[in-house]
Image (spheres, rainbow, N blue to C red):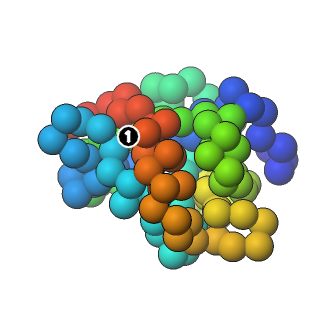
Amino acid sequence: MDDFFPEDECLYRGLPQIWLKDDNSVSSAAFKDSSGVSVDREGSRTEKECIDRMVEALPMIIGVGRLTCGDVVNCDALPRYLPVEGNEYHSEIHDSAEQIQIKKSSKAKKLANSCRVIFQK
């Protein structure tokens, strides 16, 4: 994999209970991490493979949300490919090339509104 993100590539975000609203939508808090919003990129995997890997690696989550790289760019944010040991699909959503944390509530809300819950335990 490389740093290029096709517009239609999906990004998956693990969701603990605190980030799921009563109506099963995603809270904007899911997109306000000061270290960067950790996601897994789809790569060449199926959606089921992405979900299964995330649920196995993150036992504290109760759901998985999905948005596309196009959604991220349309929200004026930046997908970044940042693999880590043991997870070649790890990526992050940053505010911009210069800033990691998404500080504007409006941007976090746009990202949350673009994120669809596709799995819940």
Q: At 37% from the left edge and 29% from the top edge, which residue is drawn? A: 118
Q: Residue furthest front?
A: 106
Q: Where 44 falls versus 102 (above or below)? A: above
Res 61 seen here? no
Q: Which quarter of the rendered picture does the N terminus lie within?
A: top right
Q: Is residue 72 left or right of residue 7?
A: left
Residue 67 in percent (x, y) is at: 53, 36
Q: Is residue 14 left or right of residue 93?
A: left
Instruction: Measuring from the top left, give residue 115's x and y in whole percent.
Output: 45, 38
- Residue at left 62%, top 46%? 75
Q: Nearer the viewer, residue 66 or 104?
A: 104
- Percent across and percent down for residue 22 are 15, 41
Quarter residue 64 falls in = top left
Residue at 47% of width from left, 69% of height from top? 33
Determine whether, in the image, residue 4 is placed left or right of residue 102. Answer: right
Q: Secondary structure at mark 1?
A: strand
* Disc 1: which residue: 64
